[in-house]
Image (tube, helix red, strand yellow):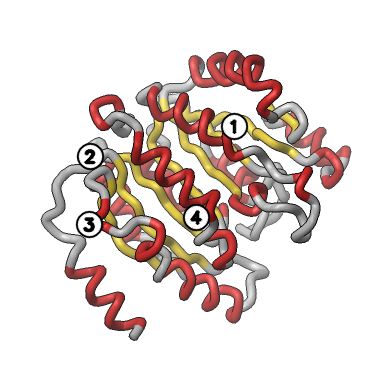
């Protein structure tokens, strides 16, 4: 049955008209991820499109298919990004890990442009490692690309260390805590976001879907407000600077959640004439 879905999806990826957004799913195995976790995420992501964005239901999306990244086989994924960015369609990448961004940056981080990375979630993802591991994406992004800067929205202060804050400051990272990134502070947040985006030529946004859910399944106060995330997305997309949006989740309850559907639907409702890739 899975192979039937795959063949159907691939047959319907060609000769599509230009859309404001291009959606794709990506599964990548990154240390120390187990093979079982990788395969489970792959199965969930491969079938996600049939619930999240049925292709016949809305003309604002095109479906670019599913990509599996293991080792250095990222050529097809990068070609797809390049193709759709060339058509001024914003790639929306649903991935199982943040580190997929590192495969996209060679395409979206043009050397003569200032790239603003926006990470919405509880963690900095600045783990200092010699090779790419889960939680290290922005350590590598900021050190490999001198023209990038990072804004983190929704940082959970209880799970950070003093050493991590010091490293973030050394890298010039800006951030708002989960308490500061709240609906009651939406006015001040808007001015801070305007200031940040005004210094960037292009924007790449990543949303950790786990941060939208109650922590450990019961702490509802810890999750980020989806209204704030939608406001942030709307402002960034309508600025005309967005090069890519990445949604990160590895389990069905994250990938096929109400919050994920709300994000995709909100993007779809933006006026097409005002929506295009930078």
Q: Residue 155 carries which label?
A: none
Q: Which mark is residue 228?
A: 1
- Residue 197's place in the image compared with 203, above or below, is above
Q: Which of marks 2 and 1 is in front?
A: 1
Q: Is label 1 in a helix, a strand or a loop?
A: helix
Q: Which of marks 4 and 3 is in front?
A: 3
The quadrant of the image that shows the C terminus is top left
The residue located at (15%, 53%) in the rendering is 16
Q: Residue 107 at x, y = what percent? A: 36, 44
The residue at which mark 2 appears reads as 86
Choose the circle earlier in sequence order: 4 or 2.
2
**Furthest residue toward left:** 15
Quadrant of the rendered structure where residue 269 is? top left
The residue located at (39%, 63%) in the rendering is 51
The residue at which mark 3 appears reads as 56
Instruction: Tell whether 260 sits left or right of 128.
Output: left
Choose the circle earlier in sequence order: 2 or 1.
2
Q: How far apart are marks 1 and 4 (CA)?
A: 24 Å
Choose the circle earlier in sequence order: 1 or 3.
3
Quadrant of the rendered structure where residue 14 is? bottom left
Q: Which mark is residue 100?
A: 4
Near-viewer residue (249 or 103): 249
């Amino acid at each position: 049955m899975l192979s039937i879905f795959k063949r159907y999806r691939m047959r319907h990826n060609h000769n599509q008209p230009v859309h404001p957004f291009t959606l794709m799913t990506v599964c990548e195995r990154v240390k120390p991820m187990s093979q079982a976790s990788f395969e489970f995420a792959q199965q969930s992501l491969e079938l996600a499109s049939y619930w999240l964005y049925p292709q016949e239901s809305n003309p604002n999306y095109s479906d670019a298919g599913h990509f599996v990244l293991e080792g250095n086989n990222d050529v097809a994924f990068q070609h797809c990004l390049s193709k759709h960015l060339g058509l001024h369609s914003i790639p929306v990448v649903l991935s199982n890990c943040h580190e997929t961004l590192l495969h996209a940056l060679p395409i979206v981080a043009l050397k003569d442009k200032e790239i603003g990375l926006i990470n919405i979630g509880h963690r900095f993802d600045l783990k200092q490692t010699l090779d790419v591991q889960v939680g290290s994406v922005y350590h590598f992004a900021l050190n490999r690309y001198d023209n990038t800067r990072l804004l983190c929205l929704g940082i959970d202060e209880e799970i950070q260390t003093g050493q991590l804050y010091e490293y973030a400051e050394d890298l010039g990272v800006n951030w708002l805590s989960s308490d500061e990134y709240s609906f009651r502070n939406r006015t001040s947040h808007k001015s801070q976001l305007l200031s940040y985006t005004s210094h960037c030529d292009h924007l790449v946004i990543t949303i950790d879907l786990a941060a939208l859910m109650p922590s450990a399944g019961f702490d509802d106060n810890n999750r980020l407000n989806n209204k704030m995330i939608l406001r942030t997305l709307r402002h960034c997309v309508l600025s005309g600077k967005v090069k890519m949006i990445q949604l990160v989740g590895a389990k069905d309850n994250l990938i096929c959640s109400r919050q994920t559907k709300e994000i995709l639907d909100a993007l779809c409702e933006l006026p097409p004439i005002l929506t295009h890739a930078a």
